[in-house]
Image: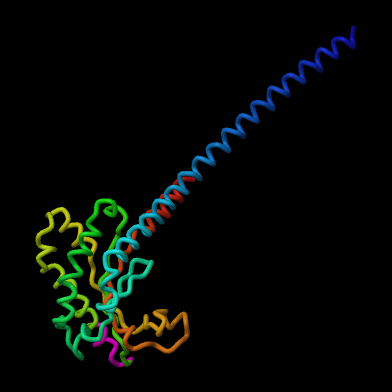
Amino acid sequence: MFKKDNSALWISMSDMMTGLMLIFLLIAVSFMYQIQEKQKDKDKILIDYNESNLQLYKELKNTFSEKQENWWMKINSDLEINFNKKDINFETDKYILPENFKNILEEFLPKYLNIINNKKYSNKIKEIKILWHTWECKDFEYEECLILSQRRANSVLIYLQNTKVFKNVTIENKNKLNFWFTSNWMWDWKLLDKNWEYIYISKLEPDNQKSRRVEFKIITNSDSVIENIINKK
């Protein structure tokens, strides 16, 4: 009789342990499912971000493919466009926009604004920098170079804001563009070599012509993307 009672107790304990194991298994499966779903959300954010950048890059390349050689234009995958044609350079110590560059901008800007004004990029773009890179400055000329470079970048931005295409956009788009576009000076800290690489990285000699350039650089909301991923813990 004692053995029977013991056996029944053992069976009861065994059933209870089995039930607990099933509960723990269900909890573990549920937890793993939640982790996988969160990872899928993170992956989707990264994929959307990368696809938007790639799509924007391809659109820039396709739009200006026929003009790259004539304008001495280089479009990089980081959404940076360089102009470094000799006859678009400012005169020494001057910041009045050269006529030849005005002619290029008259054709470039309508197409460029048409691309970035597309609604699919509205929440992807954080800033668009206009930068003027000087070739070489002496240390004692630092302040003069800084002021001159900023004035040259300002000249490009002011010209953009006075173009017909800019004035004709909607108030909403104009406010957006004014918010995005900034003019930035750039001294000779980012000189390029003959291969378009920064000499700081390549350790090669700087290329005069490639280093003197005007840039339009799109800055995307990468920080927002990272913050989104971090928040999806």
Which residue lies most toward the top here?
1
Question: Residue at the spot x=65%, y=30% of the render?
Answer: 24
Looking at the picture, does residue 167 appear above or below residue 9? below
Label count reads 0
Picture coordinates of residue 2 (x, y %)? 89, 10
Question: Residue at the spot x=27%, y=68% of the render?
Answer: 64
Q: From the viewer's perspective, is 181 left or right of 26?
A: left
Picture coordinates of residue 54 (x, y %)? 38, 59
Residue nearer the viewer, 149 or 62? 62
Residue nearer the viewer, 178 or 199? 199
Quadrant in which the N terminus is drawn: top right
Quarter-wise, where is residue 215 in the image? bottom left
Question: Residue at the spot x=38%, y=82% of the render?
Answer: 192
Picture coordinates of residue 222 (x, y %)? 38, 58
Q: From the viewer's perspective, is 223 left or right of 106?
A: right
Looking at the picture, does residue 221 appear above or below residue 138? above
Secondary structure character of the magenta stretch overall? helix
Looking at the picture, does residue 50 appear above or below residue 140? above
Scheme of colours in the image = rainbow
Q: Which segment is the magenta one?
A: 139-146
Q: From the viewer's perspective, is 76 left or right of 3?
A: left
Picture coordinates of residue 106 (x, y %)? 15, 71
Looking at the picture, does residue 177 appear above or below residue 3? below
Which residue lies most toward the front here?
66
Question: Residue at the spot x=49%, y=42% of the render?
Answer: 38
Quarter-wise, where is residue 14 in the image? top right
Residue nearer the viewer, 140 or 176? 176
Quarter-wise, where is residue 139 in the image? bottom left
As for residue 210 lying within the magenta part, the answer is: no
As for residue 144 lying within the magenta part, the answer is: yes
